[in-house]
Amino acid sequence: MHSFGRAIAAVLVASALAVSGAHAQTPNRPQLAAAIKAEHSANVKRLRDWIAFPTIAAEKINVDKGADYMRALLLDAGFQQAKVIPTSGVPGVFATLDAGAPTTLGIYFMYDVKQYDPKEWSSPPLEGRIVDRPEGRAMMGRGAVNQKGPEMAFLSAVRAFKQTGRKLPVNIVLVAEGEEEIASPNFHQVIANPEVLAAMSKAVGVFIPMAGQEPNGATSIDLGAKGAIELQLIAAGEQSGRGPAKDIHSSLMAVVESPAWRLVKALDTLVADDGYTPAIDGWFENVKPLTARQKQLIAGGVSKSDEAEIKKQLGIRQWIRNEDFLTSSYRLAQQPTVNIQGLVGGYTGPGGKTILPGRAEAKIDLRLVPDMTKDEAVAKLKAHLAKRGFDDIIVNVSGGYGPTETDENSLLVKSQIATLKRAGVPYSLSPRLAGSWPGVTFTGPPLKLPAVGFGLGTGGAAHAPNEWYLITARNPKVAGFDQAAMFYVDYFYDLARVAGQAKR
Amino acid sequence: MHSFGRAIAAVLVASALAVSGAHAQTPNRPQLAAAIKAEHSANVKRLRDWIAFPTIAAEKINVDKGADYMRALLLDAGFQQAKVIPTSGVPGVFATLDAGAPTTLGIYFMYDVKQYDPKEWSSPPLEGRIVDRPEGRAMMGRGAVNQKGPEMAFLSAVRAFKQTGRKLPVNIVLVAEGEEEIASPNFHQVIANPEVLAAMSKAVGVFIPMAGQEPNGATSIDLGAKGAIELQLIAAGEQSGRGPAKDIHSSLMAVVESPAWRLVKALDTLVADDGYTPAIDGWFENVKPLTARQKQLIAGGVSKSDEAEIKKQLGIRQWIRNEDFLTSSYRLAQQPTVNIQGLVGGYTGPGGKTILPGRAEAKIDLRLVPDMTKDEAVAKLKAHLAKRGFDDIIVNVSGGYGPTETDENSLLVKSQIATLKRAGVPYSLSPRLAGSWPGVTFTGPPLKLPAVGFGLGTGGAAHAPNEWYLITARNPKVAGFDQAAMFYVDYFYDLARVAGQAKR
């Protein structure tokens, strides 16, 4: 769910609080950079091989071996230990690199990828071919930018220390999951593992490697994101005992309860008559308004965005309620949503067919804002339906987590800003993505750590055909693979330095 | 839509007001029967060849050549003239056989068939293979019973006169359409043709050849049927200019109108909160209650039906509102319905996908009872939606017609009862099918003719895989192909006789 959401934020909340460059802080930087350069072809091959082995939780593809593959990659890059952590679903991976440093960095990886349809691709989605793009030479393949490319850049940074026989300035604790694309239904189990929890508690914060640079080089640090719950609402005659167990002739609508109408009537209660405002009982109880600072950050982004271009991309002529761009941008961050992803039931082909379907399903996602929680939202939805007599409607929660928020004054974010400034990269702070990622697993109890997305480089078409990740940049303002890796090397030193200053 | 609806009526309104046999009224009956027997293999081949050439309006298959095929079959059977009648859609066919008789019989054919999926069939749906069934030897193929088999039996009866060099005792005016399975959107254009209208005006009534005998040999004369309108309600961002033109990321639900929610909100207004009762403004204005006689006929059928077996077949544990069987049987005939045939929009695969769909569609059928009309229903639906601000919802009416009713005391029905009695076939009168057929084209203005379904023989799985039509019966109470044909021969004489008596 992550990078796609980020792509939208990148559109809506524009970048570039330009900052001046800073002085180098990385000892023996040329040797480390040379190591990364020397390993370039091998690293590209590692990424290509990883893309060839996709884990797709929704389709149960490589859900048993993906974690082993991830574990092997981590050990090979220089982690001292890595183990597979079983869950009720696809297993996670936990790895540590103890450099004997006073500061520990937490890292979150997803090793799964989104579904794909090879017919829609111009190059086979598992081949990781190098293609020529306006941005430069890029690797095309499922998972290239979401998230294997940025993660491989991070691993290349770690490997550079092994290559040059040097110690990292920080320790690393890494957790990886294989169910991010189905809304992380079991990731909390990975964190709840006592060994993982103990190791992760030592971290100053956590980030997921990202590659969201815009053509002008600008990037953003996403301080927060909405939570997301994916669920299916299903009305089935077999369940209620009133409707039919299978599709029957439509004339029987006169004497048999229709599951499709049952679903429509249940759905109708979930949002107000404006077709927009959530109407689930108590839904806004714990909704916290945006702070003045959050609004300031949003307004700063809006002022630099091209509203007309965004509307054109989305194929819309107006925002909801015909509101202006700034109001809509606040709303994008502020509003919890009840969205219909899909409707499916009965006859779905061309024209009609005279049946009364035995089953109808709505695919729903709920986006949550602070301080809503996943458990609260699911419980409220179920209570709402039950109170209105819809207890025959099946609520199948397939994944989800609450919203996440990180303080811009945290040590994690301050150290990241330091590296961005050193690299001369323009950046913005995005207070809350409308999209979602399971950062709450870190920012929520028991860890309560800062958690953000962070990195240089670029790519596109996450979740879409022809996904790509930039390997060699044509534009000097944007990082290619080696520069993205080197950026993490620099960051390790900035984090160690900023953490050291904080302790003094 | 027809035979499938009839199959249900045959289940719900049981048969068998047993009547005694009667004396033969067909001159030189043995010679006519011998002619049909002699032509048996050729007739079966004609049916098989016809099945191999399906016209499917929904899929635009053979929509140009099906009428030519129909025309050739009619001429070959003995009609003196047959012509293709163009319409805005698939053309109709008009044929006459003038025997110089004082009485003219109207016949309605459909030459199109329902869609099929070969994967679901045990024998290729266009091969018309002979299969062995408990009922006897049957032909399996799309259109076998709905409606090519019964129609070919009728043509065999007509052909017997040509074979034996004899004149029919009645004239025949026949109209055929190629869009019955998409709810006859243009059939009225065939009837409105001045030549067709003039010829059909001379008929005493119209029937469609049917094959609905039950294992005990019983059949029914369907005096009426509900009307049916098929339509699609479509919410599309492109149409409203508010929602997105295509699927976008689901996080944008916070700021972009959702066509899927728009559709749900519009649908919700069409039926009451019970998920059952139509709530379209003025919907019941012209609904006429069942007469005492109609209720009597329904009650007669109900008393002989196995409610538990019917419920088992439908996969339900209770009727709507938990009503008893008799009340439900009245309701089946009486209630106009607004049915959802299907829902489709956005992501329809397994689990979920984080999109906000640009388009959502509900496939709807409306069943109408006397004295509702198609034009009235469509106008009221559109006005209802417009009044509530849903004028962006596209209402795509793909077909339909009003309800049909025929008087049991009409000459047509009385002559049919005479032939059933003569054949010793138990029968019932069904006042109103819950299913639909375009009989209103004949029973409504300007023709105002009696119109029913009529015939012997049997078959099954209309609209379903492995559709079949009985060729050679194992059970002497049920007619095979030759007996079904001979039944129509007998009927021609009974009609001539009953009509002659009426004139005296």
Image (cartoon, coloured by chain):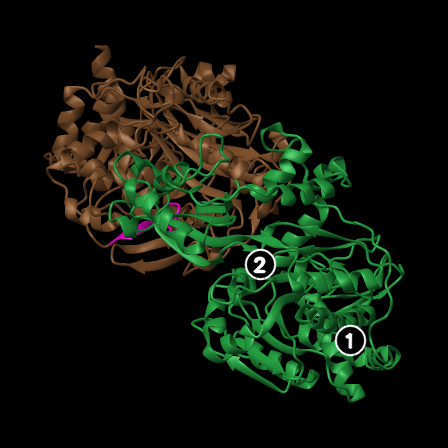
Chain colours: A brown, B green
Q: Does the rendering let one see residue A221? A: yes
Q: Residue at x 73, y 81 (%)?
A: B168
Indicate the chain on which mark 1 is placed: B
| Disc nearest the viewer among 2 and 1 | 2
Q: Position of residue A379 (x, y in %)?
A: 46, 18
The reply to whether the magenta stretch includes residue A463 is yes
Q: Does the rendering let one see residue A180? A: no
Q: Is residue B384 above or below residue B421?
A: above
Total numbered circles: 2
Q: Residue at x 41, y 36 (%)?
A: B268
Q: Secondary structure at mark 2?
A: loop
Q: Nearer the viewer, residue A173 or A339?
A: A339
Picture quadrant of residue A152: top left
Q: Which residue is mark 1?
A: B44
Q: Is residue A27 above or below residue B243?
A: above
Q: CA distance from mark 2 to mark 1?
A: 26 Å
Q: Which residues are magenta?
A: A462-473
Q: Check disc 1 and give the amino acid type.
A: Val
Question: For this view, does B192 lie left or right of residue B237?
Answer: right
- Quarter of the image with the N terminus of chain B in it: bottom right
Q: Residue at x 58, y 29 (%)?
A: B321
Kindly identify which numbered label has been placed on residue B62.
Answer: none
Kindly identify which numbered label has been placed on residue B437.
Answer: 2
The reply to whether the magenta stretch includes residue B198 is no
Indicate the chain on which mark 2 is placed: B
Q: Is residue A34 above or below residue A415?
A: below
Q: Nearer the viewer, residue A260 or A472?
A: A260
Q: Check disc 2 and give the amino acid type.
A: Trp
Tell me if mark 1 has few (under 14), some (14-19) or many (20+) residues whose alpha carbon lies within 10 angstroms of its own: many
Q: Position of residue B475 (x, y in %)?
A: 89, 59
Tell me if mark 2 has few (under 14), some (14-19) or many (20+) residues whose alpha carbon lies within 10 angstroms of its own: many
